[in-house]
Amino acid sequence: MSLRMGRTSILAMPLLAAAMVPSFASCAQTEGAEADGGDGRVVVPAEAGVDGGDLDASSDGGDCETSANDCVSQSITCDEAPWCPIPTGVSTRYALTAVWGSSKNDIWAVGSGGTIIHFDGAAWTTTPTDLRHTFNDVWGSGPNDVWAVAMTDTILHTTGFASGTATWTRVPAPRDPRNALPVHAVWGTGPDAVRLGVRAYSFYDPNTGEFPFIDQYTLKVEDDGGIGWDPVEGEGSVLGFWGSSTDLWVVADNSEKNSWQKGMTKQGTPGKGGVFEWKVVDSQSTVVLEGIWGSSANDIWAVGQKGTIRRMSNGAARWEVIDAPTQESLHGIWGSGPNDVWAVGDSGTILHWDGTAWSPSLAAFALGKKPNLYGIWGSAPNDVWIVGDGVSLHYTGPKSGGQGGGQ
């Protein structure tokens, strides 16, 4: 049930729920030969001719064992691999944690070190923020309404990319900045219907004398046109959203309250007054689930640690356990339809679902350690982006190295 109250009536208590946050220390060397367009832009090379091994001459594979699954000891080209590294201009010391776009010519990626970059169909451009926070997610309702989130006191909004740049504005915090909490996810159904997923915390409610939890905030427009936030009561640190205005799903970590509830999933549907009512759905997962996506309300996927994949079909009572061809932790998932779904994770893991089975896919990584991959988004089946430790990867369709999404 949504809890609406004035800020003065909330007395913060010690945190009782902490979400699993991936470490974004970069171990990959995947860029380094960027072509600077002279105006802050990084010109994208012709993908078919890019050799992943040439993007950073310092990556010679010397730290890798030939048999290690997390290392590249022999490079392949973008002619062979479906996924091609694209220079971003961002230091390889930083990780890109999330990616979202409104179209193939309007794509945003965010990450550590205050990084926010934009792709206009030809080049990635850095947009300054003067911040050093790690942004955890990015989402928009369209090209002129985009959000980037890091902490409850670091929520940025832009009206879009124009004339070579974008202006990001820090919006009012939903809670006292002195008690800022991580914001792991942002999602919505329109400019005035935006939702934040935060690290859960308890508070004292003087009206009931109880200590309920808050796990989300929803945007509200004040009478003067300003931005405000309503807290939403709920357990579990929310790590991801997927759904619609009438059927919303979240993945959350509630292990600080219940040790067995790391892989919590909840379904929300409008109740009295249109306020969402939530129910916990058995995920059959004992590990944290970090990503969620669906092709429809009857076909939803969730992924998480240790190669965990779950599927919800046709309103089943609990999630189905799906075999995965990896034990690497999975952080992000996206698809163009029920028979075209991608999942990404640690050690360069890229998996594809073709409607029958999950199979690995290849990327033209540089020699050396494979990067951890965190976010994925696409505008179409043959225009998909992945971001991770110091890297962005672009998929434009099958290559000689693999049929469809496979190797």
Image (cartoon, rainbow, N blue to C red):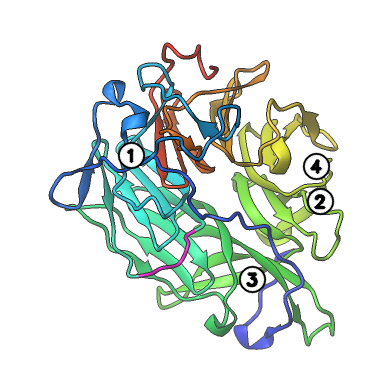
Q: Find the distance from the CA under tag 2 to the CA under tag 3.
A: 19 Å
Asked whether the beta carbons under mark 2 and mark 1 sit within 8 Å of each other, the answer is no
Crowding at dot 1, Cα within 10 Å, few <14 / some 14-19 / many 20+, comes out as some
Q: Which residue is mark 1?
A: 56
Q: Which residue is mark 3?
A: 231
Out of 351 and 239, give the one closest to the viewer.
351
Q: Is residue 352 left or right of residue 88?
A: right
Measured in 3D between alpha carbons, the distance from the residue under mark 4 to the one under mark 3, in whole angstroms, is: 25 Å
Residue marked by disc 2: 280
Q: Nearer the viewer, mark 4 or mark 2?
A: 4
Element type at mark 2: strand
- Overall secondary structure of the magenta section: loop
Q: Quadrant of residue 372?
A: top right
Please state the extent of the stretch shown in magenta in the rendering: 131-135
Residue 383, quarter of picture: top left
Residue in view at x 51 percent, y 57 percent: 136
Q: Is residue 322 above or below residue 105?
A: above
Q: CA distance from mark 1 to mark 3?
A: 46 Å
Q: Is residue 288 magenta?
A: no
Question: Where does label 4 land, which residue?
Answer: 283
* SS class, disc 4: loop
Coordinates of residue 402 in the picture (x, y in percent): 49, 14
Residue at point 67%, 44% (across, down): 247
* Discs 4, 2 touching: Cβ within 8 Å: no
